[in-house]
């Protein structure tokens, strides 16, 4: 059948065009129809019958409105609206071509579908003879576009939200909204186990008892990329044993395809099962949408895995696998909220391995790392399940202790941990025992924020280290103030060094006959705002900041100068004892600097004796022996200060070139009560005699102690009972007085001699 006017506006037909036309009419999937000038259908092609269900017979000779131009109204009724207008003044008469997507076609069964169309007027010498229209069902296209929009929305949601189950639920809901006749279940595959994460459309199904898991066995499973594969046996049983999956099958829906989602490495990461209502027709878009659902589900799962991994990388320390500080802060924050509700306390502990740096340096970093890992494993095993361990940095851990009743609980736990740590750890054949120090701050007393708690735990840690390491120390506000002041003091000390704010005090050292034979030089610092500050406070700060070195240089110079000044004033030559810190002794030029100072001042080296501490000696016995020998070679004396505190090791005494032991004043306490048996002091003096060392008893405060000491074999004594540290002029006048009195036996008593006038006394203890 020829279509009148289809060539309107075209070139002249070529040979065979007739045949081509009719082939096109036969085979094209588009609908083509023609009308006369009154809108009566004069031609329909076979595709129209396919699309609408009307036969050509039923349409020809009928108004086109029988099957075309019906737009659904809001009330649901279809309205006749001609697709090609036949009004005399309409565009039809101008020979124009119309295109549009708004047309609606009516099927014989009463349903409608949207169509895109092209219509043209057939004109004969300017007169309208009819119209011809080509149209295409665009319902699928529309649905596809609609799905694309949905898919894009889901994609953004996946990127924004990191909760996998809610992302998968979003996908399942969208699928069922799109295909109301189907249901869907989305699983996460973990190894061989299927875990249902989302489902939609499954609840209101009726029961179909004959359904069984056997269907799964038979299911040919399209893999999401379009290739069909059969679920491997373990996966089939994995899916079949998922309880919810069984329940779904028992509820009576028919299992459609199961799509297996695979990750980049080919491993199963998830599965999408589709269930169909067998009474409904399968629509063309279904497979496409399912494919898309699979892609979305796979992206959601992968995104989640990536996110978790990234979070893991961000949150975990690589060598130990422990959570890092970042993670810890989050966790701690959460825990704080819960504890507040529970009315319980949290202990935040900073745990630092003592001397770990040395281990690292001796063993090398690789072994150091392994060792650190072993330590972290031991700690992880020692803590309770509810507690939480993280790596802070370097050799520091943070431990969060939960559900505590008080700080004593935290101390108890930490003390046990420290004990566990002291058991030797074997790594690569090296057995190492480690000690650690812990600082503890309590939530909420010591801080309401993570930062505050960590800061205060760190302050407590520093205090624990200062107190001798291997200890657990709970934060207190006093500690906080100390640290604050220490920070201010560093600055003030820098100024003090620059502005020469230090002075010396001299405490006489007596023979047992109460004759002054030496002075111990003690550093004094008076700060403009804080007043007189005890060296017990500022010396440790000067030591940790290195300021002790210039301060110590000044002390030695001042002591030498003072001795020379007294010599020139005609006073009897006394020995000068000066305190030196480990940090000074460690300087390679220490001995040569002292030699230089002695030389410049003119003081004989024998007149100077340096007091050093046991702790410095112990840290490196061989090195200490070498360094001390250099001083000895110069002719300078060496004394051990505070002997007997902490280390009580006599072994090193033989190994070192020493002159004097200064017996710590703690040994003198016992002398008061049991004046007749000063056994420890006697033991020390006995040993000193064996080794050819002199002894000075420090901190003599009572007459009884003097009496006891004179029987103990001690050589010299020093203490408040005899004299406090004095300013140089007071010390000099004391020395002069002794010179004029002469002899020892009738030497000053406590009142006449040992108590300097207050203004002469620099420290009032
Ligand atoms: P130290 O070397 O043990 O000095 C003795 C300390 O005991 C002095 O405290 C002294 O005043 C005090 N003392 C003396 N007799 C008695 C007594 O009978 N009873 C009591 N309770 N105390 C007594 P000071 O002057 O406060 O010095 C404290 C510490 O500061 C010194 O202890 C020493 O370790 C350090 N120090 C002082 N001057 C220097 C210095 O120039 N360099 C270095 N590195 N450290 C210094
Ligand atoms: Ca001393
Ligand atoms: Ca001392």
Image: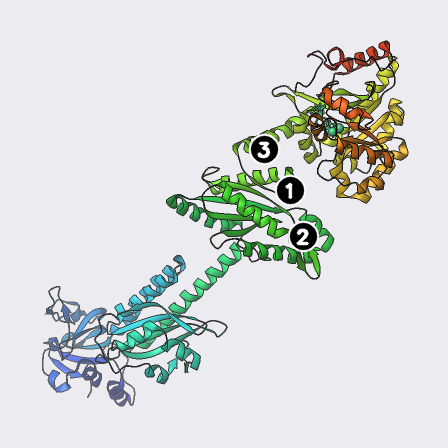
The color scheme shown is rainbow
Mark on residue 469? Answer: 1
Q: Earlier in the sequence, mark 2 or mark 3?
A: 2
What's the CA distance linking mark 2 and mark 3? Answer: 30 Å
Of circles 3 and 1, the one toward us is: 1
Relative image position of residue 332 (x, y in whole percent)? 47, 47
* Residue 613 appears in the picture as rendered: yes
Relative image position of residue 318 (x, y in whole percent)? 58, 57
Q: Which residue is mark 2?
A: 433
Would you identify the image quadrant in which residue 585 lies? top right
Q: Are marks 2 and 1 in contact (CB under 8 Å)?
A: no
Q: Is residue 315 above or below residue 500?
A: below
Of circles 2 and 3, the one toward us is: 2
Closer to the camera, 567 or 316? 567
Classify 10 Å Cα crowding around label 1: few (below 14), some (14-19), many (20 and above). many
Look at the numbered disc 1 and give the secondary structure of its residue.
Answer: loop
Q: Are marks 3 and 1 in contact (CB under 8 Å)?
A: no
Look at the numbered disc 2 and give the secondary structure of its residue.
Answer: loop
Classify 10 Å Cα crowding around label 3: few (below 14), some (14-19), many (20 and above). some
What's the CA distance linking mark 3 and mark 1? Answer: 17 Å
What's the CA distance linking mark 2 and mark 1? Answer: 14 Å
């Amino acid at each position: 059948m020829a279509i009148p006017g289809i060539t309107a506006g075209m070139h002249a037909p070529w040979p065979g065009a007739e045949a081509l036309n009719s082939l096109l009419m036969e085979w094209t999937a588009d609908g083509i129809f023609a009308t006369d000038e009154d809108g009566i259908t004069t031609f329909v092609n076979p595709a129209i019958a396919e699309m609408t269900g009307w036969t050509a017979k039923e349409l020809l000779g009928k108004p086109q409105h029988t099957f075309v131009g019906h737009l659904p109204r809001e009330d649901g009724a279809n309205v006749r609206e001609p697709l090609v207008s036949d009004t005399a003044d309409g565009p039809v008469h101008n020979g124009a071509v119309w295109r549009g997507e708004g047309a609606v076609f009516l099927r014989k069964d009463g349903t409608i579908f949207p169509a895109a169309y092209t219509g043209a007027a057939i004109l004969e010498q300017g007169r309208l003879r009819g119209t011809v229209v080509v149209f295409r069902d665009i319902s699928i296209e529309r649905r596809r576009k609609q799905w694309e929009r949905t898919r894009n929305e889901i994609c953004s949601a996946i990127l924004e939200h990191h909760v996998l189950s809610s992302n998968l639920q979003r996908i399942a809901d969208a699928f069922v909204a799109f295909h109301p006749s189907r249901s869907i279940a989305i699983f996460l595959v973990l190894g061989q186990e299927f875990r249902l994460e989302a489902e939609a459309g499954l609840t209101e199904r009726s029961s179909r008892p004959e359904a069984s898991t056997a269907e799964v066995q038979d299911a040919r499973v399209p893999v999401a990329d379009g290739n069909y594969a059969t679920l491997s046996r373990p996966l089939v049983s994995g899916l079949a044993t998922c309880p919810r999956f069984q329940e779904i099958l028992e509820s009576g829906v028919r299992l459609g395809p199961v799509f297996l989602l695979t990750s980049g490495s080919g491993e199963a990461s998830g599965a999408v099962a589709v269930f169909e209502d067998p009474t409904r027709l399968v629509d063309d878009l279904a497979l496409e949408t399912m494919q898309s659902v699979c892609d979305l589900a796979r992206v959601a799962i992968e995104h989640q895995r990536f996110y978790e991994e990234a979070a893991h990388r961000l949150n975990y320390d690589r060598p130990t696998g422990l959570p890092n500080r970042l993670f810890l802060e989050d966790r701690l924050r959460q825990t704080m909220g819960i504890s507040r509700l529970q009315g319980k306390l949290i202990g935040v502990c900073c745990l630092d391995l003592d001397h770990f740096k040395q281990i690292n340096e001796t063993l090398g970093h690789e072994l150091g790392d392994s060792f650190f890992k072993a330590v972290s494993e031991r700690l992880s095993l020692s803590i309770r399940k509810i507690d939480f361990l993280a790596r802070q940095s370097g050799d520091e851990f943070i431990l969060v202790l939960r559900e505590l009743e008080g700080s004593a609980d935290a101390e108890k736990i930490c003390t046990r941990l420290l004990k566990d740590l002291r058991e030797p750890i074997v790594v690569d054949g090296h057995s190492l025992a480690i000690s650690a120090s812990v600082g503890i701050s309590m939530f909420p007393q010591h801080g309401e924020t993570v930062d505050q708690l960590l800061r205060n735990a760190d302050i407590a840690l520093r205090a624990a280290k200062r107190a001798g390491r291997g200890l657990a120390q709970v934060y207190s506000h006093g500690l906080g103030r100390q640290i604050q002041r220490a920070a201010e003091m560093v600055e003030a000390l820098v100024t003090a060094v620059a502005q020469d704010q230090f002075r010396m005090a001299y405490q006489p050292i007596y023979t047992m006959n109460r004759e002054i034979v030496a002075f111990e030089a003690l550093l004094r610092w008076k700060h403009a705002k804080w007043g007189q500050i005890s060296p017990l406070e500022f010396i440790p700060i000067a030591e940790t900041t290195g300021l002790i070195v210039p301060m110590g240089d000044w002390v030695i110079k001042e002591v030498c100068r003072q001795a020379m000044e007294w010599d020139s004033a005609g006073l009897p030559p006394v020995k000068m004892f000066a305190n030196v810190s480990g940090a000074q002794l460690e300087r390679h030029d220490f001995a040569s600097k002292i030699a230089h100072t002695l030389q410049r001042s003119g003081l004989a080296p024998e007149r100077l004796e340096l007091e050093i501490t046991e702790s410095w000696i112990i840290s490196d016995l061989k090195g200490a022996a070498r360094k001390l020998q250099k001083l000895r070679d110069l002719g300078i004396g060496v004394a051990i200060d505070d002997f007997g505190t902490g280390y009580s090791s006599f072994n090193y005494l033989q190994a070192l070139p020493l002159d004097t032991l200064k017996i710590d004043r703690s040994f003198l306490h016992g002398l008061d009560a049991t004046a007749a048996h000063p056994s420890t002091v006697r033991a020390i003096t006995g040993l000193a005699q064996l080794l050819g060392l002199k002894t000075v008893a420090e901190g003599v405060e009572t007459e009884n102690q003097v009496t006891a000491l004179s029987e103990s074999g001690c050589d010299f004594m020093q203490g408040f009972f005899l004299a406090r540290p004095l300013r140089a002029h007071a010390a000099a006048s004391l020395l002069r007085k002794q010179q004029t009195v002469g002899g020892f036996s009738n030497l000053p008593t406590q009142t006449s001699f040992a108590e300097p006038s207050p203004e002469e006394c620099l420290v009032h203890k």
